[in-house]
């Protein structure tokens, strides 16, 4: 039985990855920061199957201690300050977690066991003011936020440890990936949650910023599979993970409101406070390399993604104790509907 350590296990990606690893027969160790209140909602359906270890990306010794105690063969570093708007108001904290935190994990691996395979969660936000369309592994980075800058550091320090210490370190340059488990502060879940509330008569408006920004949106359950595949290869490498399609925020809004037979124009209001100081206008990825070398491809398309998120929000609002279903159930529910276009 392999052992895997997942930092950021209580987040969207961490919960999906932990579920996938359990299905692959792993012993899963989930690292969490010690706080007065830890939210395990996303892990509720698998919490009794994983082990929780307390550690912090700001504390080098805690990382060394976890590696020495559990001796994982694989480490997936998903922990970060990952909300772009917050990175503008807390740039130093973002740098500590999202940039230097990566170095601390890599140093712990170098000290305890350099044979550990390491996955770093890189981001399409590193491309920022894009230098070419679509973006691929060779595209130059031009980050437009403290978060994007910090992710560039984390990406290159992973490459540096790979080349300097022969550590099996890979970076997944993941484009936007969403799900019902996405935080409500992110625009996609902000939209679908508001649509569900409006449909149920619990709200009457949705305030958004830039409706013209375009993103390459995929399903988080698909993207964690790519993370795992990267660490199963014979040699370490970096991969763009994306759908290759781009949609505007307005198109997301139209799809979401249209699914529940509402006219978005009656409810959506643009609010300047939700605009970024420096906007990223267009992100769309080329995952050809991942398809060729990993055999990876997305299984849930844009329309099915929006709809499965709304279905989940409607269920949770009507029954808060419903919780998050496993990946297979999540996809099956949407695929079974005549409107769904997912291809599980």
Image: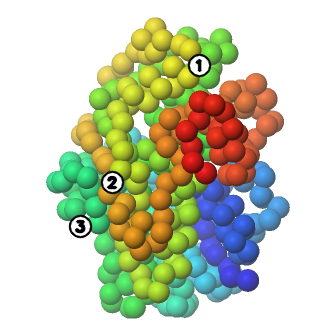
Between the C-alphas of marks 1 and 2, the distance is 30 Å
- Picture layout, residue 339 above or below residue 74: above
**Disc 1, disc 2: CB below 8 Å?**
no
**Dot 2: within a 10 Å radius of its alpha carbon, few (fewer than 14), some, or many (20 or more) residues?**
many
Mark-to-mark CA distance, 1 and 3: 41 Å
User: Where is residue 242, by image quadrant?
Assistant: bottom left
- Residue 120 position by quadrant: bottom left
Residue beneath the point at 51% across and 77% down:
231
Where is residue 144? Give x, y as percent.
25, 48
Badge 3 or badge 2: first in the primary sequence? 3
28 relative to 222, above or below: below
How far from the left and from the top, in percent, is residue 263? 48, 12
Looking at the image, residue 156 sits to the left or right of residue 107; the answer is left
At 71% from the left edge and 75% from the top edge, which residue is drawn?
26
Eyeballing the image, is 256 above or below 67? above
Q: Which numbered dot is residue 260? A: 1
Please say whether residue 32 is visible from this viewpoint: no
Q: Is the residue marked by circle 1 packed among few (<14), some (14-19), or many (20+) residues within 10 Å?
A: some
Q: Residues within 10 Å of mark 3 (few under 14, many from 20)?
A: few
Q: Residue at x 60, y 68 (%)?
A: 6
Q: Residue at x 67, y 68 (%)?
A: 21
Identify the secondary structure beneath mark 3. Answer: loop
Label of residue 138 in the image: 3
Cβ atoms at labels 3 and 2 below 8 Å apart: no
Secondary structure beneath dot 2 equals loop
Looking at the rendered image, the disc whose residue lies closer to the viewer, 1 or 3, is: 1
Mark 2 sits on what residue? 285
Give how far across and how far down residue 325 sits, in percent. Answer: 73, 46
């Amino acid at each position: 039985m392999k052992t895997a350590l997942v930092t950021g296990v209580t987040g969207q990606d961490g919960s999906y990855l932990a579920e996938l690893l359990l299905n692959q027969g792993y012993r899963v160790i989930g690292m969490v920061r010690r706080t007065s209140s830890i939210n395990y909602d996303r892990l509720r359906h698998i919490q009794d199957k994983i082990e929780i270890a307390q550690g912090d990306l700001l504390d080098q010794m805690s990382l060394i201690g976890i590696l020495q105690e559990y001796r994982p063969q694989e480490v997936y570093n998903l922990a970060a300050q990952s909300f772009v708007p917050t990175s503008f108001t807390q740039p130093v904290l973002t740098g500590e977690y999202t940039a230097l935190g990566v170095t601390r994990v890599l140093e712990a691996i170098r000290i305890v066991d350099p044979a550990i395979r390491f996955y770093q969660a890189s981001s399409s936000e590193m491309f920022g003011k894009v230098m070419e369309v679509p973006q691929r592994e060779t595209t130059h980075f031009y980050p437009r936020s403290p978060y994007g800058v910090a992710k560039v550091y984390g990406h290159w320090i992973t490459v540096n440890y790979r080349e300097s210490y022969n550590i099996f370190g890979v970076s997944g340059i993941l484009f936007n990936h969403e799900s019902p488990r996405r935080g409500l502060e992110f625009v996609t879940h902000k939209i679908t949650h508001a649509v569900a509330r409006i449909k149920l008569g619990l709200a009457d408006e949705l305030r958004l910023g830039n409706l013209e920004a375009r993103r390459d949106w995929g399903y988080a359950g698909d993207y964690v599979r790519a993370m795992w595949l990267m660490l199963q290869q014979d040699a370490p490498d970096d991969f763009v993970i994306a759908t290759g399609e781009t949609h505007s925020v307005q198109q997301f809004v139209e799809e979401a409101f249209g699914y529940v037979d509402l006219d978005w124009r009656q409810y959506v209001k643009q609010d300047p406070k939700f605009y970024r100081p420096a906007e990223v206008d267009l992100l769309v990825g080329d995952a050809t390399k991942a398809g060729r070398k990993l055999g990876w491809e997305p299984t849930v398309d844009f329309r099915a993604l929006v709809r499965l998120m709304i279905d989940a929000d409607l269920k949770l609002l009507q029954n808060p104790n419903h919780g998050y279903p496993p990946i297979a159930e999540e996809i099956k529910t949407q695929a079974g509907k005549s409107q769904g276009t997912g291809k599980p």
